[in-house]
Image (cartoon, coloured by chain):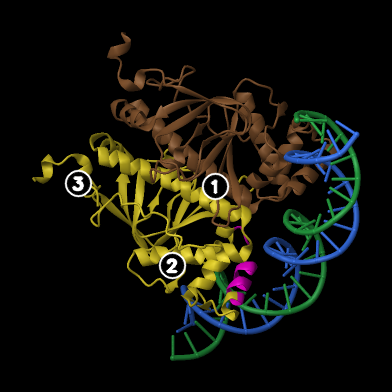
Chain colours: A brown, B yellow, C blue, D green
Amino acid sequence: MDADVLPAHRRACSRRRLVRGESLCTAGDSFRALHVVSSGALKCFVTSHNGAVQITGFQIAGDIVGLDGIDTGLHQSGAVALVDAEVFVLPFAQCKQWSQESAYGQHLLMRTLALESIRSQRHMLALGMLRADQRMALFLLDFSLRYERLGLSRTKFVLGMPRQDIGSYLGLTLETVSRLLSRLQREGMLQVQGRSIDLLDFPALRRLAGLLTEHRCTALDPIVDGMGRLAVTPR
Amino acid sequence: MDADVLPAHRRACSRRRLVRGESLCTAGDSFRALHVVSSGALKCFVTSHNGAVQITGFQIAGDIVGLDGIDTGLHQSGAVALVDAEVFVLPFAQCKQWSQESAYGQHLLMRTLALESIRSQRHMLALGMLRADQRMALFLLDFSLRYERLGLSRTKFVLGMPRQDIGSYLGLTLETVSRLLSRLQREGMLQVQGRSIDLLDFPALRRLAGLLTEHRCTALDPIVDGMGRLAVTPR
DNA sequence: CGTCGGGTTGAACCTAGTCAAAGATAGTGG
DNA sequence: CCACTATCTTTGACTAGGTTCAACCCGACG
């Protein structure tokens, strides 16, 4: 196929590089595009009236940023790079077109949106009814699973964010996070060295988190391929 | 227009009546349709592995139930009627068709999905960084606003759910909920009689919740009209 | 070498949870 | 219509898990 006969949504999209600490968007910015992380890591956060911030999520390769802008056309949360990162830029108009022209695209976009709210709900559940140590275990297992999906080690990984951010995400103080990591290390469940984590005892961590079964939440097909092209056929 | 030339998504959809305590769907059910509450009230909840339940939301007239099934095709949460209720049944295939044929439909469906995840995020923020009394105040103000939008009193209303459910929603125990209501009454912010609430001091409640401004989160156009027909033009 | 952001650890305090008992309410059946 | 029961609600006393405040440590960087 010739490049210029391809519908807009089939062309590879542009990319954007972010250096550590650089912000991708800020709450209140007008929403034009979705972003898919291709490398590095971001954090998303909302700011409350009094100025306090709460981290709402951490995104690594394959994760989507910016869905919060769809509703009002303004971003509801900010996103900044935890480490140097690169993202694909998917103009939202293009996504809409894609969704109208391809039944699979429509399906995928809706699933992506729905999944986002399920993730929030699951996290809500964690914040609402788990003890601090259980939240921490869940957090670590979640990261482990996500790194594994990227083909990386599920036992050894580096958390790109400071204790403060982990605390904010889990509804805890940074001191509690620090104490918990120390305690879990003392109890032999993991090894921690600054931001480097080495999970040693998965069964124990799962038991702590209250997971009976290996909690594999559905992995959604990515909406873009490695080159940043919107998917048009399954898998 | 003749009824039989209307596209499927323009025909009034069916309804379903639920008696108090009856369940609309259960986690694991296969997902076929979205539901829009037309009267009464529902609660949605997720069940964790160990059997504990957490309420994820309360739906009153105009609210949508069932978005959680879109991702996997299976409902992730259950929904039961708090009081006798009626819902419109929107077969999901029909929604998809509507979304493909009408740009406005596509827009509205996406906004609805996105709004859902923003709501979850906002609630996450509340669970993660607010004290119990602040969560309670926010909860009451939210209900007040929603009743007001339905043209009902924003000061006097009846909470259809037991303390236990409020607690579960807010990440608190039923005793704490009870104590908080008693305390807020003692402090003159409201009057409580069983499940009947009368908000007396909005400024104080807002101050408590940490809301500087009157927190009016965007009201999304309803996706169905009063007869259960999918909207095709704004407003 | 000093400073600065991030991390660890300790002690005191406090919020919300737990356990327990009694009071209200609503629903049921005689 | 009333009595009985089940459920919901309130309140108290006690406890524990997390926060707060504060000191100290470590490594990076000018």
Residue at image mark 3: B11
Q: Residues within 10 Å of mark 1 (few under 14, many from 20)?
A: many
Q: Main secondary structure of the magenta part?
A: helix
Magenta residue check for B142: no
**Badge 2 and badge 1 both on one subunit:** no
Q: Residue furthest left?
A: B2
Tags 3 and 1 touching, CB below 8 Å: no
Q: Residue at 34%, 57% (x, y): give it.
A: B62
Highlighted range, magenta? B171-183
Residue tagged 2: B144
Cα separation between marks 2 and 3:
33 Å
- Residue B126 sits in quarter: bottom right
How many labels sit on residues? Answer: 3
Task: Tell me if residue A49 comes above or below residue B200 in the rendering.
Answer: above
- Label 2 – label 1 distance at C-alpha: 24 Å
Q: Which residue is mark 1?
A: A46
**Disc with the residue nearer the chain's start (2 vs 3):** 3
- Tell me which amino acid carries mark 1: Val
- Left or right, A70 with respect to D20, comes to left
Of labels 3 and 1, the one closer to you: 1
Determine if the magenta segment contains residue B174: yes
Tag 1's secondary structure? strand
Residue B110 in view of the camera: yes
Q: Nearer the viewer, residue A204 or A45?
A: A45
Asked if badges 3 and 1 are on one and the same chain, I answer no
How far separated are the C-alphas under marks 3 and 1?
40 Å
Q: In this picture, is A175 found above or below A7?
A: below
* Label 2 residue SS: helix
Amino acid found under the numbered disc labelled 2: Ser
Labels 2, 1: front one: 1
